[in-house]
Image (tube, rainbow, N blue to C red):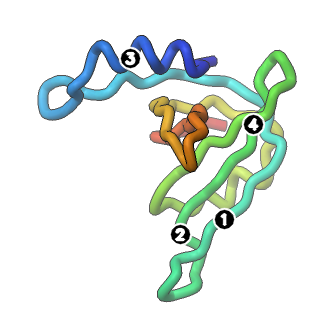
Amino acid sequence: MADLTSTQHLDHLKPFGHGFEEPRFCLTADIASVRFFNDKQTVEPRHTCVMVRVPDGVEQKIIFFNEVYAELRAVKSAKFIVSAARPVYRGAESLTLYGIDFDV
């Protein structure tokens, strides 16, 4: 799975955009939990957050924006297509995986 060092290597490939899409990765993992984040205006579920356990036992979050995948609650593992980023929040850098697609 991608780590912070791997995402630093991706920075050298930027900028991504039309004709040069951001790299995508395939990840097969056990699902630890699934929860939904609500839309602030409608209070309806809007985003899916999947916590997965990778082979070394570490849990990692995959976030699917603007998609609600309730079917992920019923499965124990899945294959995910993700993109990786390393946002900085309050001075702390972390690995974030953005879900693109999945297969159960």
The disc placed on residue 52 is 4
Packing grade of label 2 (10 A; few <14, some 14-19, many >=20) is: some
Alpha carbons under labels 1 and 3: distance apart: 29 Å
Query: Where is residue 60 drawn, in percent x and y?
Result: 71, 35
Q: Give the mark, 4 or 2, whose residue is nearer the N terminus.
A: 2
Q: Which residue is mark 1?
A: 36
**Residue type at mark 4?**
Val
The disc placed on residue 46 is 2
Alpha carbons under labels 1 and 4: distance apart: 15 Å
Query: Where is residue 17 drawn, in percent x and y?
Result: 18, 33
Query: Where is residue 83 drawn, in percent x and y?
Result: 45, 31
**Residue type at mark 2?**
Arg
Q: Secondary structure at mark 2?
A: strand
Specify the quadrant of the image occupied by residue 30. Answer: top right
The residue sitting at the bottom extreme is 42
Alpha carbons under labels 2 and 3: distance apart: 29 Å
